[in-house]
Amino acid sequence: MAKTAEPKTTAAKTAGAKAARGTRTAAETEKIRVALIERRDELKAEHDQTLVDIAELQQHRLTDSAGDDQADTGTKTFEREQEITLANNILERINQVERALERLDEGGYGWCEKCGNAIPVERLAAFPSATLCVTCKQLEERR
Ligand SMILES: [Zn+2]
């Protein structure tokens, strides 16, 4: 049997090479924009609610604290601090979505930094700051 010099297929894998960014239709871009705006509105509503909660906790602290024992006061202070931390986290996420929307306008948003594939709209809506597609993200985590 003649020995066939089969070319090695490993070279086909462009490991490490930055893939060219794909193209997206205007409709797809619009879909991402809508998803991001929805996400931002949700976060803003959540942020508003957190501010209301903080104000209420503050109010309780001022009005009911006379009858509270020390443990109650401590719990309320802790709750309020937690709410403030939460509000700051939400604000940070709103900023991430705002930045994502800016980058979307420039065409630089929603592409995997590793393989250059389009990151699915669903993933972007759930994680507006995602810079990797699910496959690359999983590979990253496995390292
Ligand atoms: Zn990727």
Image: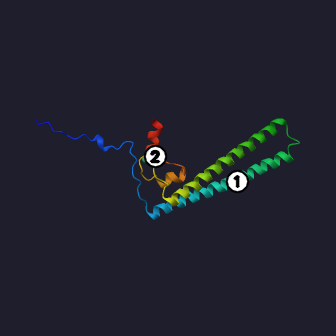
Q: Quadrant of residue 7?
A: top left
What is the crowding at mark 2: few (fewer than 14 residues within 10 Å), some, or many (at least 20)? some
Give the number of the disc on residue 8: none
Query: Which quarter of the rendering shows the C terminus?
Result: top left
What is the crowding at mark 1: few (fewer than 14 residues within 10 Å), some, or many (at least 20)? few
For the point 51% across and 58% down, the residue is 104
Position in image of residue 10 (x %, y %): 29, 40
Which residue in the rendered view is the most extreme toward the left? 1
Q: Which residue is mark 2?
A: 134
Position in image of residue 39 (x %, y %): 58, 56
Is disc 1 placed on a helix, strand or loop?
Answer: helix
Ligand 1 within 8 Å, label 2 CB: yes
Ligand 1 within 8 Å, label 1 CB: no
Q: Is residue 109 left or right of residue 45?
A: left
Q: Which residue is mark 1?
A: 49
Position in image of residue 101 (x %, y %): 55, 58
Q: Nearer the viewer, residue 4 or 65?
A: 4
**Pointer 1 or 2: first along the chain:** 1
For the point 65% across and 51% down, the residue is 91
For the point 68% across and 47% down, the residue is 88
Is disc 2 placed on a helix, strand or loop?
Answer: helix
The kind of residue on which mark 2 rests is Val
For the point 55% across and 55% down, the residue is 100
Snapshot colouring: rainbow
Q: Are marks 1 and 2 in contact (CB under 8 Å)?
A: no
Q: Estimate the spatial distance between the alpha carbons at disc 1 and disc 2, rounded to whole Å.
A: 32 Å
Tag count: 2
The kind of residue on which mark 1 rests is Gln
Position in image of residue 56 (x %, y %): 78, 50
Q: Nearer the viewer, mark 1 or mark 2?
A: 2
Query: Which quarter of the rendering shows the N terminus?
Result: top left
